[in-house]
Amino acid sequence: MHVIGTAGHVDHGKTTLIAALTGINPDRLKEEQERQMTIDLGFAWLTLPDGEEIGIVDVPGHRDFIENMLAGVSGIDAALLVIAADEGVMPQTREHLAILDLLQIPAGLIALTKIDLIDDPDWLDLIESDIRAALRGTVLQDAPIMRVSAHTRAGLPELVQTLSLLLQKRPPRPDLGRPRLPIDRVFTLPGFGTIVTGTLTDGRLHLGDEVEILPAGLRGRIRGLQTHRRKEETALPGSRTAVNLSGLEAAQLRRGDVLAHPGRYQPTRRLDVRFRLLADTAPLQHHTEVKLFLGAAETIAHVRLLGQETLAPGETGWLQLELCEPVVAVRGDRFILRRPSPGETLGGGTVVDPHPVRRHKRFDTSLLRSLEALAQGSPAEVLLEAAQALGPAAWSEVLGRARLEETVARSALQTLLEAGQVLQLEEFVLTAGHWQSLACAAESAAAAYHRAYPLRRGMPREELRSKLKLPPRPFNLIAARLLEGGLLTAPGANLLALPQHRVRFSPQQEAAISRLMAKFAAAPFAPPSVKECQAETGEEVFAALLENGDLIQVSAEVVFRQADYETMVRKIRQAIIEKGAITLAEVRDLFGTSRKYVQALLEHLDAQGITVRLGDVRRLKE
């Protein structure tokens, strides 16, 4: 799933464009609708031509609300930079573009709006030329420019198609088995209680999960999940997610908090970061007070410049940020720094160490070398990324992709195992996210099979392996782990089922079974034929009786009740032991039945390795 975010100067038509594309007005506040100006984040969704449903975050364009904008764009997969054809590139266009560049938003396109107000095509060409000049050197320098009008709907189908093609090239969000939801909205609804929203990253959330709200450490439970107002059992990484929480009051929560599984993340008041100062701002001095924007959170921080006295405009350097309030951060998270007053975007960068153990000496050369090495990735992180890319894979494959020395890699693997980020199943390694995805997929496949075939005890192992698209060896190890954990059961040879699955017959089916069993009881050694059984109960119920062992089919035409079959086998064994051998006629007389039934039974016993035919007699097989 993907999420896009708008950006652009105030009154350039961002909200109007989203409403035209989706039929949803993202301006939800009464004040916004009265002033016809976006003040806070708005949300909508759109189904693309390829069937993908994407989330949309609409942000305010006015400079007074830039901090609200920052809370919405950090989790997006692509940007929709909106520029009005009658005004062109404006101050907030440039500031929003700088923020998108600092956050390294991976994709985007430019919507040149309000073209219905322009009669001169040369003017549009001139505006496009100015836009290209503004985009040069940024992440959006190669972004397509689409001429559109929300009023006449000109260009909207082409914009949607281009957006679809753009997102098809974006990889899915990784599932690392450690979900976190930066909260960008908190509200209540009558009958539901507390609800929070955000863009989910790094893992899945499930209905009923216990969760922790950080940095406060509050505990609650997921009462409901929605994506685009649709109820879900599981929320996927990259989706706009609304979480209905039990055990928590809305007054306890705020924008910038992070929802996660308990114990997976630790808040921090100190960050080591790589930072780029924008070229059109003043030099950055040591101990400058700034505002940090990370995910949906913002807090005051003090800058500690490492390795230099001053950072010049356009330069990149190392900072240690001392935070006034704790935040949740992960290595690789992007952030923005702004001057508190007067408001100005200073620059942004990447979190390199979210949990520095101490306050650094500013001119420690060994520290700077360590930060440079950490920026390239720790062995554990490199190994985790390799395992994430490969899926369930042999250790030798993971080692080869990570390109680590084996001793270092083994140590890193142990670190990841202890942290619960990977699992090792004999020679195979897989991430916690992959395990969770496979477990969910196995449960879903089994549940779907039970719905389709409610009278079957379980799903064939090979069919589940095919659904999971796994080779035999890793599948067998994963299936064994699922059985050990009680997520699946084995109700029969080569069958897998959900623990709660039971074969249950309807009252009508029970009545038909009773009638059939009465026929068996009336003539246990000359029972109804297979066709007669199927006519009485139906093929599905008959198959269930066979699978459950209530009936034993010995040939294409002959079937016995299990108790009668066992009686016949026992008596045949006993007769052969007493006489040394037995003929077909003797077996027929033993049970007072016809040749048809006896011949089918004896051939079945031969095939089962119980008896062996020697001429006209049968003996027990040695």
Image (cartoon, rainbow, N blue to C red):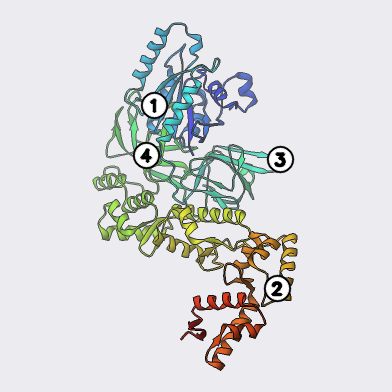
Q: Which of marks 4 and 1 is nearer the N terminus?
A: 1
Structural distance between the alpha carbons of marks 3 and 1: 41 Å
Residue carrying label 2: 520
Quarter residue 426 falls in: bottom left
Residue 50 point in image, percent of width and height? 49, 33
Instruction: Decide which of 615, 220 is in the foreground and name it.
Output: 615
SS label for mark 1: helix
Residue 283 point in image, percent of width and height? 32, 28
Instruction: Decide which of 511, 216 is in the foreground and name it.
Output: 511
Q: Which amino acid lies under the numbered mark 2 shown in the image of this protein?
A: Phe
Quarter residue 46 falls in: top right
Residue carrying label 1: 98
Between label 3 and label 4, give the one nearer the viewer.
3
SS label for mark 4: strand
Residue 504 in the image: above or below residue 305: below
Between label 4 and label 2, give the one nearer the viewer.
2
Q: Do the residues labelled 3 and 2 touch (CB within 8 Å)?
A: no
Residue 496 in the image: above or below residue 109: below
Q: Earlier in the sequence, mark 3 or mark 1?
A: 1
Within 10 angstroms of label 2, few (less than 14), some, or many (20 or more) residues? some
Between label 3 and label 2, give the one nearer the viewer.
2
- Residue 350's label in the rendered image is 4
Q: Do the residues labelled 3 and 4 touch (CB within 8 Å)?
A: no
Residue carrying label 3: 190
Q: Is residue 342 visible?
A: no
Q: Which amino acid lies under the numbered mark 4 shown in the image of this protein?
A: Thr
Count of marks placed on residues: 4
